[in-house]
Image (tube, coloured by chain):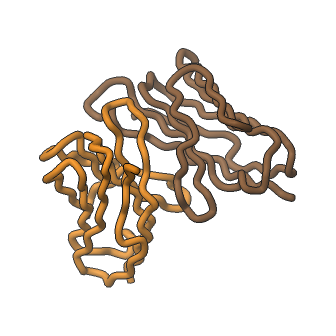
Amino acid sequence: DAEITQSPRHKITETGRQVTLACHQTWNHNNMFWYRQDLGHGLRLIHYSYGVQDTNKGEVSDGYSVSRSNTEDLPLTLESAASSQTSVYFCASSRRVGSEAFFGQGTRLTVV
Amino acid sequence: GIQVEQSPPDLILQEGANSTLRCNFSDSVNNLQWFHQNPWGQLINLFYIPSGTKQNGRLSATTVATERYSLLYISSSQTTDSGVYFCAVGMNYGGSQGNLIFGKGTKLSVKP
């Protein structure tokens, strides 16, 4: 079955380190997204991509970057991890603008 | 940007009771989805419903796009319905049409 997978599921890292979270989807969806979920804030958009080589900043993009070299993957990189980036991160994908989006299982990141 | 408001923020039910969750949004949308976040943190797709009415078992949803609201009905609630219910919408215009904007959720607790 087609799916969207995130890895790792849990990670602990130290302040200042570079961290990359993986997101892989097998639906051949054009659109991919990264969100973070924090208590009191719900889910907020970090970055999004509407196709290969296309990346855009979302609401809370500072300190994060993404790249889209193929349809299936949208890795999220924290350039220099900060304690404020401790959160649960969700990746999502959708076929086209306005179509149903599907979410991965999430990555719990702790920055110490 | 578009505002998404969910009500009530918290809801406690006795098993077997019915409930209605509401989502109001401030602008024209091309996408509206309801999600259930289970106690393990996974986001489960309930309905993709930019307009009209859908039913799936004990759950049903109605979106009245012209009046900018959506309702999620849960009938004969079960303890497994506990969790947080999110409404998310996609704007109908602009460069970020494909993105989902989330409400802050309704936390539902169903007591046995």
Q: In the rendering, at what x and y percent does residue A90 appear?
A: 41, 57
The x and y percentages for residue A75 are 24, 61
Residue B76, position in %: x, y?
A: 82, 42
**B55 lies left or right of A58:** right
Camera-nearest residue between B101 and B111: B111
Q: Is residue B69 above or below residue A111?
A: above
Query: At x 67% / y 40%, what residue is drawn?
Result: B7
Q: Residue at x 58, y 18 (%)?
A: B67
Q: Is residue A59 visible?
A: yes
Q: Nearer the viewer, residue A72 or A81?
A: A72
Q: Residue at x 49, y 32 (%)?
A: B32
Drawing shade for chain A:
orange
Q: Position of residue B72 (x, y in %)?
A: 66, 34
Farthest residue in the front direction? A1
Q: Quadrant of the C terminus of chain A?
A: bottom left
Q: Colour of chain B?
A: brown
On the rendered structure, is B15 left or right of A52? right
Q: Please state which of residues B67 and B112 is positioned toward the viewer in this rendering.
A: B112
Q: Is residue B10 left or right of residue A29?
A: right
Question: Where on the picture, by quarter, is residue B57?
Answer: top right
